[in-house]
Structures are given as structure tokens and as C-alpha cells.
Amino acid sequence: FLQQEYRKTDYTGLRFLAVDEIAYAKYHKYLTIVIDYETGRVVWIGEGRSKETLQEFFNHMPKEAKENIKAIAMDMWEPFAQAVKESCPTAAIVYDFFHIVANYNKVITRVRRNEYHKASKEDKRVIKGSRWILLKNPENLKETDKPKLKDLLAKNESLAKVYILKDELKAIWTYKDKDRMALALDNWCELALETKLPELKRFVKMLVRHKEGILNHATYPIHTSKLEGVNNKIKVLKRKAYGFHDLEYFSLKIKQGCQGKPKLDQQMWS
């Protein structure tokens, strides 16, 4: 039944996709998952996370189906981007906002670590244990965290700068006009470079390299977070099966369990 129903890839009706890799076993064992962004349906699953893995998905896609793909959300994993550019060049690549924020959180963590090592004994006491306070959104802070954050930012200029820039970075993704988003991104990069922090300099270089895919979010506000639901279902399937020995069967079970919902709005984006 599974072979009959789910082995063949259904390319019909695809306009917006989300692509991500998901670990299915230890020692860097990955599956590449492609979903229909509008319905949440798992369209295709491939072993590995290389350029060739994703190209395999496009190799069997009819020409008309490729031309119908408007945008594909993904993280900044270069092999996936190369696969799309070579195999489906008319589709816009949209780099995932949540992955970029996660990368920026790593910047904050590294700056905090460096500032701790340079700090005086008194300031070390303020910086120690502050990681999660810096990474949390302001609305998620406990009342007991707020005075600690205020004291930390008052005592350390570098941490104050990266903390303020975090909220300004998130605001860039609220723009619906590509030119205005580009201006906001350029302004943010200038402010980040003015801090003279090497961690921010490297982050800015990464943003510049991926600028076009970042700006495409203004036109196509899609992301990969819908794949989190797929990831959770995979964990449930693994737990129920006490592990698995047949990867093809496991992939078919994932497709069976992630059929998504019918499209409600065919005019989602022009």
C-alpha cells in the first residue's frame, strides 16, 4: 500500500517549497525533506544533504512543474542553493529568517564569551550566567531578569551594541518592499561594522554573500519553520518503531503521516 500510494513523487500544484535537512540517526546521517509550503505536504525525501541529493528531486520534475515554482525557502546551506540555481533557475531562493537569527545568537554568545575573558573580576560576576538573558526576546524575560539585563548593558558597551542590533536585525524582515528592505539591511550592516567587533564583521560578510536570498523575503515571506512539525513526526515515528532498519520504508511512512492540508488561498502571492 505504501509503495503504491507514496513512492511516486507528486509534483502537481507546487508553487512554493521549503527545503531542509533533518538528522535521522547518529554520526551525521541526514535526510533532505521537501515540502509544499502552502499545504505542508511532504513532497519528497532524499538520503543525504548534498547538492546532488536535492538535484535528484528536480531531475524527475516535469519542465512545466519547474516553471510553476515561484520560490523556495531554505537555510544558508550552499549545496541546496547551488542545486536550485542549476536545476530550477527561475525559482527565487528565500533564506530562512529563523536560521539567520540563530546565527546571530551565536554571534552574541561569542561576544559575551570574549567580553567575559577580558572583564575585571567585578564585571565577570555581572557577565557570568547572562547568556540566556541576552538571547531571550524582551517579552519573554522574567521580572527578575530585567534588572540584571539593565546592569549588564550599562557595564559592557560591546554587549549593549550586539543586544540592540539584535532587535534591529529582526525588524528588517518586516519590510514588504524589496528596495526598502535592502536599504534597512545596508544601514544595519553599516551600524554593525561601526562596532569594530570582529564577530559582527564576519556576520556582515555572511549577510552580504546571501543578500539576494534575504531580500527575496520581501516578495515571498516564506520560511522553513513548517518543517519543524515534520521533524517532530519523525521523532514520534522513530520512537514508536524503536528505531528502523529500512530507510525507504521509513521515508514512505513520513510521507504518509505528513499529507498536509488543502490550499485555502490560491492567490497567496502573485
Image: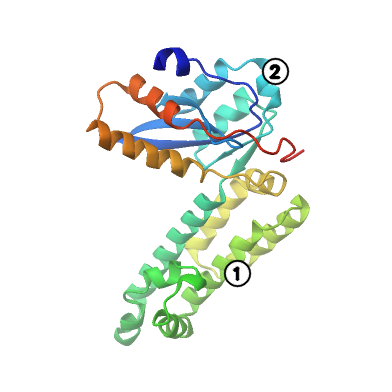
Q: Is residue 63 above or below residue 53?
A: above
In the rendering, which numbered label is found on residue 64? 2
C-alpha gap between disc 1 and disc 2? 48 Å
Report the amino acid beneath label 1: Glu
Residue 262: % across, % down = 61, 33
Q: Label 1 belongs to which residue?
A: 194
Residue depicted at x 56% and y 51%: 97
Q: Is residue 176 above or below residue 146?
A: above
First in sequence, mark 1 or 2: give its number: 2
Residue depicted at x 38% and y 68%: 132
Residue depicted at x 38% and y 26%: 253
Q: Is residue 3 above or below residue 174?
A: above
Q: Is residue 241 above or below residue 231?
A: above
Residue 155: % across, % down = 44, 85
Horizontal side of residue 236 vs 164, given as left or right: left
* Viewport quadrant of the N terminus: top left
Tag 1–tag 2 contact (CB < 8 Å): no
Residue placed most toward the observer, 137 or 103: 137
Report the label total: 2
Horizontal side of residue 54 vs 175, given as left or right: left
Circle 2 SS class: helix
Residue 106: % across, % down = 43, 59
Circle 1 SS class: helix
